[in-house]
Image (tube, rainbow, N blue to C red):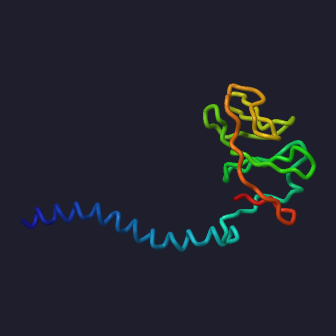
């Protein structure tokens, strides 16, 4: 019977494996509390200074999965950096387009529309604001 209880305890160990994972999870809220503090507490995140985004071009922010463009002086747009063709990350912005290295899709910097396939759908727009010379995501 002790073996059966031990076996049950072993089954409980896998549950208790969740419990230790829950213990670090109790640490996780402290970790989770840290990023919002870094982001200003509102969920918004400063991506760049407006001066960092070239006119007619843009910049890819890989960690945030977003690309920010400046199609006209002082006009800033943001789009997902995930290509709508096969889900690759776009690599750069040049020549007025956001460029995917996987299959050659290109998207317009002004509106994310497809400039050249094989992608058939535009990049989804992301919400940004410009605050005191900074571009803020969220």
| Position in image of residue 89 (x %, y %) | 67, 40
Quadrant the N terminus occupies: bottom left
Q: Nearer the viewer, residue 77 or 12?
A: 77
Quadrant the C terminus occupies: bottom right
Q: Residue at x 81, y 40 (%)?
A: 109
Q: Residue at x 81, y 36 (%)?
A: 97
* Displayed quadrant of residue 127: bottom right
* Displayed quadrant of residue 36: bottom right
| Position in image of residue 90 (x %, y %) | 71, 39
Q: Residue at x 72, y 34 (%)?
A: 100
Residue at the farthest left position: 1
From the viewer's perspective, tell me whether residue 93 is left or right of residue 18: right
Q: Nearer the viewer, residue 118 or 124?
A: 124
Q: Nearer the viewer, residue 21 or 118?
A: 118
Residue at the farthest right position: 73
* Displayed quadrant of residue 106: top right
């Amino acid at each position: 019977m002790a073996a059966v209880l031990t076996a049950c305890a072993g089954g409980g160990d896998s549950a208790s494996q969740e419990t230790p994972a829950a213990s670090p999870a109790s640490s996780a809220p402290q970790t989770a509390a840290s990023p919002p503090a870094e982001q200003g507490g509102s969920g918004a995140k400063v991506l760049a200074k407006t001066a960092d985004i070239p006119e007619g071009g843009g910049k890819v922010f890989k960690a945030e999965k977003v690309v920010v463009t400046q199609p006209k002086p002082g006009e800033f747009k943001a789009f997902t950096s995930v290509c709508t063709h096969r889900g690759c990350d776009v690599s750069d912005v040049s020549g007025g387009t956001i460029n995917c290295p996987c299959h050659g899709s290109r998207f317009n910097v002004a509106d994310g529309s497809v400039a050249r396939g094989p992608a058939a759908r535009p990049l989804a727009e992301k919400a940004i604001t410009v605050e005191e010379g900074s571009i803020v995501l969220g």
